Image (cartoon, rainbow, N blue to C red):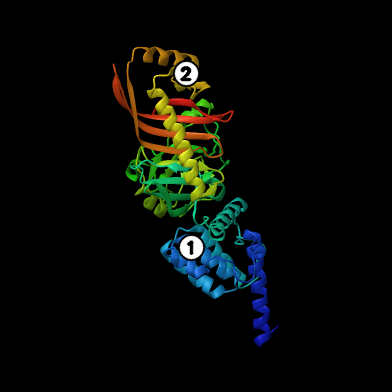
Amino acid sequence: MKSGSGANFYLMSKIRHAIRFFLVLMLGLAALPAGGMGDLLPPLQYARSHNNNPEALLVNILLEIRQDRLGTALRDVDALLHVNPNFRLAHLIRGDLLMARAKPLASFGNADGAAPDQVADFRDEARVRLQRYLEQPPSGKIPKYLLQMQPEQHHAIVVDTGKSRLYLFENNAGEPRHVADYYITSGKAGAEKLREGDQKTPLGVYFVTSSLAMEKLSDFYGVGAFPLSYPNEWDKRQGKKGHGIWLHGVPRDTYSRAPKASSGCVVLANPDMTALGKTLQAGLTPVVISDRVEWVSTEEWRSQRERFKGEVEAWRRDWESLDNERYLNHYSRAFSTNGQDFAAFSAQKKQANAGKSALRIRLSDVSIFQYPGKENLMVVTFTQDYHSSNLSNVMRKRQYWQMENGQWRIMHEGAA
């Protein structure tokens, strides 16, 4: 039986050993340096800079644990749970902190009867939330996909399924500006949806199509839902199937779900879904879903944007010239639209142009997005104002451009 300072030293040694073991099992944090962490904000300052939101507070608690500040960590997790009593990961951490006072932990989630699959889900959630702190969005860089937003698109979304993260960007005079990001849940079977029921999240460029209020939904979808345009025109061309991919919230008794737990939807905590929902515009807001977001410098982004805007302008100018050969050279021989292949489309355009003595094409509200995972695929949407000697109309159009043998060519074109 130990007593006095010796007993206290022995107890603290046991606790520190237990906590180190807890962190190794949970996140592999033993690999982190014992001292400072480079340019990262100190944990408490990080939490304050994020308005003490639940995730930032959780990160602060995890790093307090790593620093053996157990009393502070327990106090802070209690405060977090007071405000968010349905935050199950925080409950698990609190339970482990309490148990570490009495005995070394055998594993993360050491409570009796804890289901191994649920514990693994909590471990993954803790890992990706902490990863957001350790691997912050690169300063001064932009996701390569957001080449141009039209003026009416006030915001754009980029989802990184690999990091369980959704980034929100504001249209700042044509340049994307990062304003917020959120932890998300995606498909339990991973990404790259191919067919109905495969429980995967699609990868591609989509648009919010509508808004569904919580009053019209079951509690499963939380505070509301925003359907996305999956399958898009390119998905259909690739033979991909399925439907019902939404951005939505979680049930009222749940703060968040595991990183990979949905049937393919992108799921946010209800407070995050409420905040995000205020920025979404049905029919306008682009949602780019990638399994690994690529960031580029502002200079590279501007260069790529100007180069491709030049391709679109060359297509417009050549169409306006009524020179069929120049115009049709912008289209791939693998082009298809509304059941037409290139041969049928070409014949139709030649016939239509034969009866015209003049043609004027004006493009406005142009957006350009690079397809994730596809270096040489672009999605272009615009309003087309068409005036010829015998026909005038205005329509919203979308094109998919792909690089073929060193030249950009249109693979699909149709109404948006």
- Determine whether the residue tagged by mark 2 lies in a helix, strand or loop: helix
| Residue 251 picture location, percent across and down | 43, 49
Picture quadrant of residue 397: top left
In the current view of this chain or complex, which residue is farthest to the bottom? 4
Instruction: Identify which residue, 170 or 388, lies in the foreground.
Output: 388
**Badge 2 or badge 1: first in the primary sequence:** 1
Q: Badge 2 is on which residue? A: 325
Left-right relation of 362 to 102: left
Residue located at (33% from left, 21% from top): 359
Residue 98, visible in the rendered structure: no
Residue 176, visible in the rendered structure: yes
Quadrant containing the N terminus is bottom right
In the rendered view, tell whether residue 407 sits above or below residue 103. Answer: above
Number of numbered tags placed on the structure image: 2
Instruction: Identify which residue, 311 or 238, lies in the foreground.
Output: 311
In the rendered view, tell whether residue 10 sits above or below residue 196. Answer: below
Instruction: Identify which residue, 372 or 100, lies in the foreground.
Output: 372
Q: CA distance from mark 2 to mark 1?
A: 58 Å
At label 1, the amino acid type is Ala
At label 2, the amino acid type is Glu
Left-right relation of 259 to 346: right
Q: Badge 1 is on which residue? A: 56
Quadrant containing the C terminus is top left
Residue located at (39% from left, 12% from top): 351
| Residue 195 picture location, percent across and down | 54, 31
In the current view of this chain or complex, which residue is farthest to the right? 1
Residue located at (49% from left, 35% from top): 378
- Label 2 CA crowd tier, 10 Å (few <14, some 14–19, many 20+): few
| Residue 28 picture location, percent across and down | 65, 60
- Determine whether the residue tagged by mark 1 lies in a helix, strand or loop: helix
